[in-house]
Image: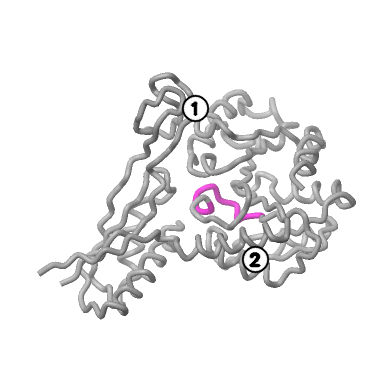
Amino acid sequence: MHELAIAESIVNIALREIEQKSITTVQSAGVRIGAISGVNPSALEFSFEAIIVNTPLSGAKLKVEEIPAGGICRACKTAFEVTEFIFVCPHCFSGDLEINQGQELDIAYLETE
Amino acid sequence: MTQKIEIEKKILSENDRLAAGIRRLLKDKKIVSLNLVSSPGSGKTTLLEKTLVALKNEIKMALIAGDVQTENDANRLIRAGGKIVLPIVTGGACHLDAKMINEALGKMNLDGVQLLFIENVGNLVCPSSYDLGEDMKVTVISTTEGDDKPLKYPAMFRRSSVMVINKTDLLGYSDFDMALVKNNALQINGNLKIFELSCRTGIGLEVWYNWLKSLV
């Protein structure tokens, strides 16, 4: 359950932003969570909602954009989505892949009034 | 009117900044660092005890032992001859982070140290997200666990450079399939370096020691 620690990191970044830009009300915080980031989006939402009570983020929603894992095969240059964590090219079965998405653990934006 | 304020930052940017600092520090001091991760009970501490005894005259080692509660692991490593051992009791946290490692390193005398082991909290999920500034993650599993473990915890196996399969002396006493576990792990990470060994009988440990010697 490290989602609680991840949620704390999101809140810390958001609170700094709120202070620097004198934001009053935050409606939502937008994050991107990659499929192979090791973070569970629903546990993250739960943790976020639990720890923002009585902070300037109180009432804000966490908007999670889930990013599928994907990459390009270095052998045959096919681009593909990685499903079920099988890191093998579906076209030529090579394991020599360049994974270019799915590791995301980013805070993208805040929506304010 | 809703207004969108762009932030575009890595959630763990603070951890990653500290980890980068640790990586620089260890590189400057020419210290190779391994972050050992596993489920509870796979044998991380036993592997380190054996390594401390076997290589005490050849490699100067430092160890950070993370545990949720108790300093038992650190005490075992000291009893095994570890001279530079620092416990981190996380007090409930399920993983070590770069801040904890940074603080621990500040308390250690690293002069002449060639190899740093970080024994993470026994957990194959949470530690995968946290860069500790290590050179490599080493995942330890054992033959009393399921051979589908790589499939259940793919993020960790994906991010590891090495997989140690411990307790090979118990092969045949469980349904653990050695060929299958390797196949499962390599499907997730084709670059994994794999060691098969038994800390109890010592079989396979020499290969592990030789690899450690080749790193420093």
Q: Residues within 10 Å of mark 1 (few under 14, many from 20)?
A: many
Q: Residue at x 38, y 33 (%)?
A: A82
Task: Residue at the far left: name it.
Answer: B1
Name the subunit of mark 2. B
Q: Residues within 10 Å of mark 2 (few under 14, many from 20)?
A: many
Relative to B125, residue A109 above or below:
below
- Kind of residue sitting beneath label 1: Gly
Circle on res. A25:
none
Q: Is residue B121 magenta?
A: yes
The front one of A109 and B179 is: A109
Report x, y in % for residue B213. Answer: 80, 43
Q: How is the image coloured?
A: one colour
Q: Determine which residue is flagged by label 2.
A: B88
Image quadrant of residue A86? top left
Q: Residue at x 74, y 34 (%)?
A: B197
Name the subunit of mark 1. A
Q: In this rendering, would B159 be left or right of B165?
A: left
Image quadrant of residue B113? bottom right
Task: Residue at the far right: name it.
Answer: B57
Mark 1–mark 2 Cα distance, whole angstroms, equals 37 Å
Residue span colored magenta: B119-127
